[in-house]
Image (cartoon, rainbow, N blue to C red):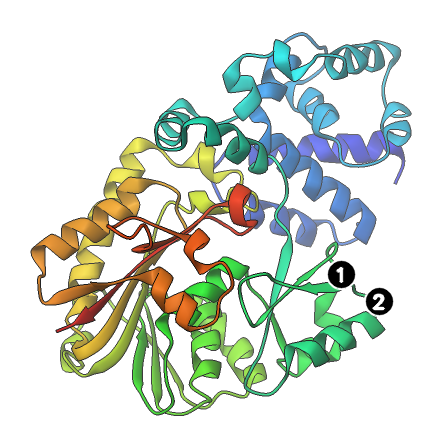
C-alpha cells in the first residue's frame, strides 16, 4: 500500500477506536474483516499505530493541538508504527516539520500527565500506593506486553516444545516463574503450527498461569473455575489434574464459553464440563454447595492490569464503573465460597492493579467469614518450587499473604490473588 494511503487508513482506524463505543481489539478485528485485502504488514502497522495512540493519548493530543489537518491524522502520524522514512514520504513539508518539532521535545519538558498518560482518577491511587515506583509502572504500561505461551503439561514437555518452536524459526525462552510458560519474540502465526493444532500450546500470560498453579488442583478432585470466560485457566487446571476428576467451567456468558470449545477439543482433556449460569446464585451453584475441593474465582474486573495489551481500558473505565465492579466482585466471592467443602481451597483473583478490587475485597470477605482461614500465597508458591516466590507477594504479617504481580516488576500482566482454606 502507498504510504499516504496507509497513513489515511491508520487515521480512519484511530478515529473509529477513539469513539470508545466498543473494545479496541473488537474494532480492529472488525476493521480487518471489512478490509480483507490488507496484507500482514499493513495489518500490523494499522493495529500497532492504533495501540500506540491509545497508550500515549494524552501526550499525543498535547502535541496534536499545534499541528494541521484532522485530529485523527495528527494522532496517527505521532503514533505511526513503521520506518520513519516510510512515514515521512507520506507527509507534507509542513507535517514533516511539525513531527520533527514534536520528536525534539524532551520528556522532562512535559507535564506529568503527558508523561504517564493515565487518567487522573487512576494515576492518583497508583501514585499514592507505589510512591517512587509509580514512574517505572507508568513507563512499563506504555510498552507492548510480551507474548507468553503455556505448554500443555498433559501431553508435552516444555523443553521439547521449545525445541520444536526453534525448528520452526520461533525463538522462545522459559518464563521465570511459571513451570509451564514460554516467552516468544514477535507475533508469529501460531495457528499454523502443529504444536498449536494438537493442543501443545495456548497463548496465556505468565501471571494467569500462576493463578492456575496457585489453585494446585489434584487428580480426582472436584474443582470449579467460577468465572471461566474463554477457559485459559480452565485448561491449565485440567492439565494439572491430569484430565481426572471433574472440573466445572462456569460463566454467565454462553458466548465466552463457546470460545472454549475448540480449545478444549485441542487440549485432549476429558474432565472439563462447561456450563452457562444465569448469575452467581444459579441453582447449579446451590446443588454443589459444600462439595467442591477447590474453587477459583477470576472475578470480572476493570482489567487495568492488562493495559499493555488493552490500553483503551484506561479511557473506557471510570470511578463509577470500578464502584459497580467491586459490588459485583464481593457478591460473586460470597456466593462462590459456598461451594467449598471443609478443608477445601478458595482462590479469589483479578487482573487489576487497584487495591479496591483486590486487598479491600479480600479483607472484607475474610473479616465476614472466619470459617475461611487465610493461606500465605508465598508459602504455597515456594512449595510448588516457584523461584523468587516471596518477590511475587505482599501483605499480611509475613509480607507474603497475597499474590501481587506488576508489569514493571515481573513483566507479567498485573494480577492479584488471595487464598483461603475452609475450616
Place of residue 407 in the rendered image (x, y in percent of width and height, measured from the top left): 52, 45
* Residue 254 visible, this angle: no
Place of residue 22 in the rendered image (x, y in percent of width and height, measured from the top left): 48, 43
Between 65 and 387, the residue placed more toward the observer is: 387
The answer to which image quadrant residue 162 occupies is bottom right
Q: Compute the Cα span from label 2 to label 1.
A: 9 Å
Q: Which mark is residue 188?
A: 1
Left or right: residue 391 compared with residue 93: left
Residue 178 drawn above or below residue 368: below
- Number of numbered discs on residues: 2
Labels 2 & 1 near each other (Cβ < 8 A): yes
Q: Quadrant of the N terminus?
A: top right
The answer to which image quadrant residue 181 occupies is bottom right
Q: Residue furthest front?
A: 398
Left or right: residue 181 compared with residue 376: right
Q: Which mark is residue 378?
A: none
* Residue 29 visible, this angle: yes
Mark 2 sits on what residue?
169
Between discs 2 and 1, the one toward the N terminus = 2
The answer to which image quadrant residue 204 occupies is bottom right
Q: Quadrant of the C terminus?
A: bottom left
Place of residue 68 in the rendered image (x, y in percent of width and height, measured from the top left): 72, 10
Place of residue 169 in the rendered image (x, y in percent of width and height, measured from the top left): 84, 67
Residue 46 drawn above or below residue 417: above
Left or right: residue 121 compared with residue 181: left
Crowding at label 1, few (<14), some or many (≥20) Cα neighbours within 10 Å?
few
Left or right: residue 287 compared with residue 252: left
Amino acid at each position: 500500500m502507498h504510504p499516504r494511503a496507509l497513513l489515511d487508513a491508520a487515521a480512519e482506524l484511530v478515529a473509529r477506536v477513539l469513539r470508545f463505543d466498543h473494545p479496541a481489539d473488537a474494532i480492529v478485528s472488525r476493521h480487518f474483516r471489512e478490509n480483507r485485502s490488507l496484507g500482514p504488514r499493513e495489518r500490523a502497522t494499522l493495529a500497532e499505530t492504533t495501540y500506540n495512540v491509545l497508550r500515549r493519548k494524552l501526550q499525543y493530543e498535547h502535541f496534536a493541538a499545534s499541528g494541521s489537518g484532522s485530529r485523527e491524522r495528527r494522532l496517527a502520524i505521532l503514533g505511526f508504527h513503521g520506518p520513519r522514512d516510510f512515514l515521512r514520504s507520506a507527509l507534507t513539508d509542513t507535517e514533516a516539520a511539525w513531527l520533527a518539532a514534536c520528536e525534539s521535545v524532551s520528556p522532562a519538558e512535559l507535564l506529568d500527565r503527558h508523561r504517564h498518560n493515565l487518567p487522573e482518577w487512576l494515576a492518583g491511587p497508583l501514585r499514592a500506593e507505589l510512591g517512587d515506583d509509580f514512574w517505572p509502572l507508568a513507563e512499563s504500561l506504555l510498552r507492548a506486553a510480551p507474548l507468553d505461551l503455556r505448554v500443555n503439561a498433559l501431553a508435552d514437555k516444555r523443553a521439547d516444545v521449545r525445541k520444536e518452536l526453534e525448528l520452526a524459526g520461533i525463538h522462545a525462552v522459559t518464563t521465570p516463574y511459571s513451570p509451564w510458560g514460554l516467552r516468544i519474540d514477535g507475533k508469529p502465526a501460531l495457528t499454523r503450527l502443529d504444536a498449536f493444532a494438537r493442543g501443545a500450546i495456548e497463548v496465556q500470560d505468565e501471571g494467569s498461569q500462576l493463578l492456575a498453579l496457585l489453585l494446585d488442583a489434584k487428580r480426582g478432585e472436584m474443582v470449579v473455575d467460577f468465572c471461566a470466560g474463554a477457559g485459559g485457566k480452565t485448561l491449565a487446571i485440567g492439565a494439572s489434574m491430569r484430565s481426572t476428576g471433574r472440573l466445572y467451567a462456569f460463566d454467565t456468558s454462553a458466548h465466552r464459553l463457546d470460545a472454549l470449545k475448540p480449545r478444549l477439543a485441542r487440549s485432549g482433556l476429558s474432565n472439563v464440563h462447561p456450563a452457562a449460569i444465569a448469575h452467581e446464585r444459579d441453582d447449579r451453584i446451590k446443588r454443589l454447595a459444600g462439595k467442591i475441593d477447590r474453587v477459583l474465582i477470576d472475578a470480572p474486573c476493570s482489567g487495568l492490569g492488562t493495559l499493555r495489551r488493552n490500553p483503551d481500558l484506561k479511557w473506557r473505565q471510570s470511578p463509577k464503573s470500578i464502584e459497580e465492579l467491586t459490588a459485583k466482585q464481593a457478591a460473586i466471592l460470597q456466593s462462590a465460597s459456598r461451594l467449598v467443602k471443609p478443608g477445601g481451597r478458595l482462590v479469589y483473583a483479578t487482573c487489576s492493579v487497584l487495591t479496591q478490587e483486590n486487598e479491600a475485597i479480600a479483607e472484607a470477605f475474610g473479616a465476614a467469614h472466619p470459617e475461611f482461614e487465610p493461606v500465605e500465597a508465598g508459602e504455597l508458591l515456594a512449595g510448588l518450587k516457584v523461584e523468587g516466590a516471596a518477590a511475587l507477594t505482599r501483605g499480611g504479617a509475613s509480607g507474603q499473604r497475597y499474590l501481587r504481580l506488576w508489569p514493571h516488576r515481573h513483566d507479567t500482566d498485573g494480577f492479584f490473588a488471595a487464598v483461603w482454606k475452609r475450616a
